Each structure stands twice: as C-alpha cells, then as structure tokens.
Image: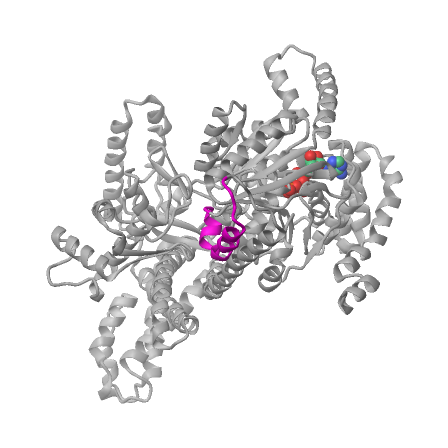
Amino acid sequence: MLGIGFIARKIFGTPNDRKVKRTRPIIAKINALEPEFEKLTDEGIVAKTRELQKRAQSGESLDALLPEAFANCREAARRALGLRAFDVQLAGGIFLHQGNISEMKTGEGKTLVATFPAYLNALAGKGVHIVTVNDYLAKRDSDWMGKVYRQLGLTCGVVYPFQGDGEKRAAYAADITYATNNELGFDYLRDNMKASVPEMYQRGHFFAIVDEVDSILIDEARTPLIISGPSQDRSELYRTLDAYIPLLDPEHYTLDEKFRRVTFTEEGNEFVEDKLHESGLLPEGQSLYDPESTTIVHHITQALSAHKLFHKDQNYVVANDEVVLIDEFTGRMMKGRRLSDGLHQAIEAKENVTIQPENVTLASVTFQNYFRLYSKLAGMTGTAVTEAEEFGDIYSLGVVEVPTNRPIARKDEHDRVYRTAREKYAAVIEAIQEANAKGQPTLVGTTSIEKSEMLSEMLKKAGIAHNVLNARQHEKEALIVAEAGKLGAVTIATNMAGRGTDIQLGGNIEMQVLQELAATPEANPDAVRARIESEHASEKEKVLAAGGLFVLGTERHESRRIDNQLRGRSGRQGDPGRSLFFLSLEDDLMRIFGSDKLEGVLSKLGMKEGEAIIHPWVNKSLERAQAKVEGRNFDMRKQLLKFDDVMNDQRKAIFSQRRDIMETDEIGEIARDMRLQVIEDLIDDYAPPKSYVDQWDIEGMHAGIAEQLALDLPITQWAAEEGVDQEVLGERIIAASDALMEQKTEGFGAETMRLIEKQILLQTIDAKWREHLVTLEHLRSVVGFRGYAQRDPLSEYKTEAFQLFEAMLDSLRFEVTKRLGQIRPISEEERQALLAEQVRQMAQAEAEVAPTPAAASAEPPQALAAAVPGFDESDPATWGNPARNDPCPCGSGEKFKHCHGRLA
Ligand SMILES: Nc1ncnc2c1ncn2[C@@H]1O[C@H](COP(=O)(O)OP(=O)(O)OP(=O)(O)O)[C@@H](O)[C@H]1O
C-alpha cells in the first residue's frame, strides 16, 4: 500500500524537486540572453567580464549578476571547449553558488559545472579555490577549464607539490586556483609559520568549490595534515622490537579485524616481557605494567600492529627504500604522508628499509577545520546522499540532487555471490572473455594492487590482452584511461579508476592526436585530427553496438560510494553500459561483516561448485553491512571532530594573534603589555595580595626580577621603607624596567628594536605553540584511559586543554620578556671580534666548496669585501653572509639562524 508520504510527494513534489524548480526562472533568463552573447566578439566577452567585475566590486550583488555571468561563461566555454553547457549543468552551478553540494551523477560534466560559480564569484576579486582529490585532476582540470577562464579574460592557476615559489605565488594570486586539499592545507600551515604577511601565499579563504566533496570532507577528514620536523633517531629500538614479532604464536595476541585492533594477551605480555628483560630494554624487576614502561609498551604494540594490521601492496608499497602509504579510497600512493607515533617506523623495520627519524608535530590541521575557514563552501559529487546527514551536521552544507541531462541507460545488475574466491575469479575471467569476444570494452575493478596484478596474471594465462591501472603505473594513467574505451579493451584497475576517470567510448581523440603528432611531427595537424575523428566515429559506433562500457567489480568496498563511483565510469552522458559485481564468501567484507547468516542460507540452498547465487536479498544484506560500517565511521569522525574543535579554537586564536603581530606598528606596546603582566605575576607570586611585608619572599622576588627583567633592584631596601605596598613596588619596578628597555631602544635605534621585538615575539609564539601541540596530543591519549574512572573524556580534555593553553600564554609572556631583557647592542670590540670570526668562517666555507666551481661561484667573495667596511649592526644589508650558527650581528645574543637568519 502506498503511504500518505508517497501521495504527498506526488502532489507537492519532494523538497529536492522544489529546489530544482526554483532554478527554472533563472535558467530561463540565462537562455534568453544566449543569442545576445553568441553575437559578442572574443573581445566583447572579455569586456563583459570587466563590466561585471566593476559592478560586483561597486556593490552589486552576485545574485543579481548571475544570469549575465552564466550566459557569458556558457558562451566562453562553447568557444573554448566546444561544449555547450546543458540546463542541468547551469542548475548545478547555481546550487554551488548558493553554497550547496550539487549531487550530479557520474559523467554528467561536473568539471564544466564548476566554472560557472567560479567565474561569478571570482568577479568579486578575492580568489576562488577549486579543490580536487589528486594532483592529476588539479592539473588536468586547470588545463582543460583554464581555456574557458582565459576566454573570459580571467587568470587561472594550479598549485602542486614542490612547486617553485614564484609560480605558486602566481597561482594563488590568480582569479581561480585549482589545488588538492593536501596542498591547500599544507600551504595554510606553512603560511602560518612565516615571519611576515607578504611572504604568505594564500590571500584568504573566500570561496571554495570542493570537487568529490565526500572523499575530501568525509573519507579524508579523519586524517590530520601534519607538518613535522625530525627528532631523535631510535632505529635500533625499532629493529630490536620488530624481531620479536615473528616469534609470537597466535595465543600471544588477539586480532580484531572489524575494529582494526590488535592487542597482546596475558601470555603475549609475559613472552614479550621476558624478551625485553633479556635484551636489557626493560630493566630487571620492572614489569610491563609499571607506569615507567609506557613508552616501550607503546612501541612493541606498534610493532605488532605493523605486522598484523598493515599489509604490503594493500595498505602500502615499498619503493626506493621507502614505505609509501596507499590511500584506501583512491588507491593512490600518498607520498610524504607518514603514520604517526612510531607506527611508520615500525613498518619500516618490518620491511627492512631505512628507518626515517621520528617526527614531532610542528603544525597540524584537519581538513574539516581547514575547510571551515572559508566564508562560503560548496561541493560536487556523484554520490552524496548516503552522507547527507554528515554534511549537514558538520559543515551546514545542504545536498541537492541535480537531475541528469539524459536518462541513465546503464544496467546495474544484481551481485553474483560464489562460495570461494577461486570460483569467483574463474567466473570473472569467463565474463571478461565473453565481453571481449564481442568487442565490449571492460573495466575490471579490484581492491588492491596485489589483486590487480594477480588478475593480470590470470588474464595473461587466458591470452587476453589488457592494461593495468594501479598506483605502480600512475605515470601512464592518462594513456591507459584514453585507451580504456576502445573496442575490445580490457583494463584492470584499483580504485584509482574513480572520480575523474573519464573513459570515452571509442577512445580519447585528443590523446590519439597528440600521440600521432609526437610520432610524426612533420604531419599536418588538421589532417591528422580529421582522420582520427572519422576513425573514432566508426569505432564509437561499434562500441555502442557492443553495449558500451562494461564495469566488472571483483569485490565490494566498505563504502557504498566507492562502489558507485566504479559503476559510474560507465553510462556517462546517457551512454549505454553495464555494471556487475562478482563476490565470494571469502571476501574481506563478507568475512568480517556478518556473512554467517548468508553462509547458512547459501549452504541450505546447496550451492554446487562454480555456481553463483543471484538474489536481491543478497544485495540488500550487503548494503546493510556497508551502511553499518559507514555509520560507525561517521560516529568516529564526529568524536574526533569534537576533540579537534578544542585545538582548532586555540589554533585560530594563535594564528590570528600571529598575524596581528606581523602587521602591527605597535609591537612595542604589545611587548610592554606582556612585560607589565609578568611584573604583576611576579609581585603576586612573591608578595601575594593582602599579605604583609614580613610575609613577602623578598629574596625570591629579587632573584625573579633579575632573571625575568635583567634588573638588579634594591627590593630589600624598598620593602623596608614606610608605606611601600605591592602597588608602590609595582610602580617602581615598572619604571626601572621601562627605563632599561628605553635605553636598549636608544642603543639599537627604534626601527631595529621594533624588528627585534617582532622576531622574538613570533619565534617564541611558534616555539610555545609547537610544544603545546605535543602536550595536547599526549593529553588526548591519556584522557582515553580516564574513561574507566567514570569521567567523560571529552569534557576532561576540554578543561585540561584550556588550562594548558593559559599556562602556555603565561610562559609565552615570561619568555618574551626575558629574552627582550637580555638583548643589547654589541660593543665595538665585540663587533670587531665578530667580523674577524665571520671572515674566518667564510674563508673556511669557501675552501670546503672550492672543488665544485658552481657552488663556489654561488657565494662571490666580493660580497664580503663590500660588506665589511660599511658594517652596521642595525642594517642587515651590510652584514654579508653570517654563518647560520654564528651569533646574530644584531647583537641579540641568539644564533643567527634563530634570529635574523630566520627572516632571510
Ligand atoms: N555540456 C556538455 N556537452 C557535451 N559533453 C559534455 C558536456 N559537459 C561535459 N561533457 C563531457 O562529459 C564527460 C564527463 O565530464 P566530467 O569528467 O566532468 O564528468 P564528472 O561529472 O566529473 O564525472 P565523474 O566525477 O564521475 O568522473 C566529459 O567527456 C565531458 O567532455
């Protein structure tokens, strides 16, 4: 029976239908403008952009400009790419502009959709960021869509790892910037470690369109981005502990695959304890349960995890003496990403590669918090409804389903479930052969590099020609994708073939033209293109007749979305296609997530060797298992976010303080306020409020003042005077310390003093903040245990994190005041000595680099000769090139690298 809800939906439409309907009048306006814009010359299009920019920047709302801007953009894209955006694409663009997630089915052309809101919002002149999941897509999309922006008279840039400074700066200064979430997050962190505003790359966080938004804001949200620096080398420890793991028996540990957890049993603990005693890593008489053993327990547990939870070629690959992680969702190598807390080192020990030094966190941010910096956020995806709740909860983003341009013609068949993996793969090979025989291009999805290579071996044996697309082959990605839609092509892929893998039926014309022109440079490009286009048309005809692209899945992923993305490689733009998953009871997902019931049912049905069960009930029960995992991950992320929120508020406070300090002209006042607070604290400590003189710790105060303010004051005498209370004392100390600082300012000159104050403040903030991050991390791991004491870990964490933050600010004030008290201009003799030392060191450095002419010429000796006669400590331009470990010529007493050397 149909419920009231259904009838109501039929009459009134769903909320989604209504949202889509509301775009109709706007789209009608854009369409009505089309003939007028078609008539514009190329210059006319650019002139229109300039006009719109003026209007936007003089206060006209972007909403009001939308129809003209979209009409201009559509015309520009038609000229630059030969694609006329469909009405549904405009609708998708409108939703993005309104700060929503546009859900558009795979292959509907989201890359083009993003140009509309990007163009409109870029008119405001504050920069628009388009965020992609990987560097390949950032480059591809900025090349591809860059043509549209240029046609419109706007600039477009791309940001990528290891880019030159100038190029990156230009990319961020462009109207539209393409970048991965990683690069954006890292640049944000790096920017906030810089010493002055002009050095920063990002000019703010105005509007971001996040492509494949669920991958970035949901899958990856759990991973914090971390900038870290090396600390001590403990490779010996890792190697020693690693050697114990292979000696363990199954009763020594318990493995919980569902929660990805492995722990030692009582027996295991005893075994390990003995081993540690033998090697001397654990002192005799100390047990693993003693609090002093925390670190060693931690590391031996990591060694165990490295062996039991991390699998080569599934979770990571070993390449060039390095352990490189593989992204679970995209199947791509995550170069530079390291597991924390010694886990990466444990895996390195297991794989017997060089153990990289452990790192300490210098700065970190999660994607969730990075993206919450933007004034407006929007996203695109093929598959968001499964996570609509999370988007609403965490990012306040609404999800709108945009209808497809043409109905989907792909057939998604029911799963086929076999008893064993062996039977499953036999059936897979057979299905590939069958499709191949009629020329249907086939894309085979696998869940790991290992499995993709195993299947490749099997196909070789069966004599079927094919390509393999996995993280090992990523250089050839574009080429393999370009071929994958050709008649009879077979492509085995890991989940690298997901978002953005645009497989064109009959092959990719552009790629073929490029290849042919590279092989025969003398050929006429137009003739080559014409021939390839006509060949392509007939090949596409045959592929369509064979049924379009066949997507064959060999396992289901934990997340439904990843499965849907694989299916979505087929049936793009209304093309025909087919998708089918082959599963077995031995698959991880089935094994781990309640296949008992399933197995019972199947055995009752009495399956024969090689036979599959195909039933909608199986699909349903699998989807339930997947939903369960997704739900659990969601809860984990929410919890993580709550913890991270605490740090995020603190980070925002510190980063904004930092920026104020970089920009302010009143640094002297900030430093003085800090000093006054320090003096107040000192008096409170040694002469508490309402206490009498004979209760004061006068000696302590004298020493404290000497230490903090570099002043030797007659506190004892003052305290003996009639009528001297805390207030009078305070006034005298302030006067003395003000006088001292004034004297220093005169000695250095006001300008240099400001520079020094700024640097000391920034350096100290950075150092304190880093220490604080480490402390917070420790606090986080410790509060978990407190759960046993019936206390809520989160509120414990919040309270303590706040106290730690306040303590950090206190110690920041003390440190800055102390360091400023210690600086002094250097004397004439010291200056001479310093110069002599510099000359000596430079001569030595030159002697060392002499054998390589290039390096020697990089530091011309004239630089020094020119610098010495005019040396002026207040003018860094006259210092020549001090060595990093030398005292800073400004006379701060700090090493150059910690002082002015940081700015250079
Ligand atoms: N208006 C249009 N007219 C004709 N073809 C179009 C149009 N818009 C996009 N296309 C084509 O559709 C294909 C898919 O585009 P695109 O890769 O942007 O899809 P997508 O929505 O991002 O898919 P997915 O995210 O699932 O990979 C491309 O080959 C593109 O050229």
Residue 222 image point, x, y percent: 48, 55
Up/down of 489 relative to 361, above or below: above
Quadrant of residue 315 within the rendered picture? top left
Pick the residue in front: 708 or 463: 463
Q: How is the image coloured?
A: one colour
Residue 795 found in image quarter: bottom left
624 relative position to 821: left or right: right
Q: Position of residue 846 (x, y in %)?
A: 28, 29
- Indicate the quadrant containing the C terminus: top left, top right, bottom left or bottom right: top left
Q: Residue furthest top?
A: 522
Q: Position of residue 47 (x, y in %)?
A: 79, 39
Chief secondary structure of the magenta portion: helix
Q: Which residue: 57% across, 51% down? A: 560
Instruction: Give the quarter of the figure containing the N terminus.
Output: bottom right
Q: Is residue 602 magenta?
A: yes
- Residue at the image position 58 percent from the left and 35 percent from the top: 139
Q: From this view, report whether residue 288 is shown above or below residue 91.
A: below
Task: Measuring from the top left, give residue 568's x and y in whole percent.
Answer: 64, 42
Q: Can residue 498 be seen from the camera position used here?
A: yes
Residue 833 lies left or right of residue 83; in this view the side is left
Residue 816 part of the magenta-drawn span: no
Residues in magenta? 586-609
| Left-right relation of 545 to 300 | right
**Image height check: is 311 above or below 595?**
above
Q: How many marks?
A: 0
Residue in the picture at 22% in, 59% down: 267
Residue 888 visible in rendering: no
For residue 454, side relative to residue 816 (left or right): right
Quarter, ligand 1: top right
Question: Extreme left residue here?
Answer: 284
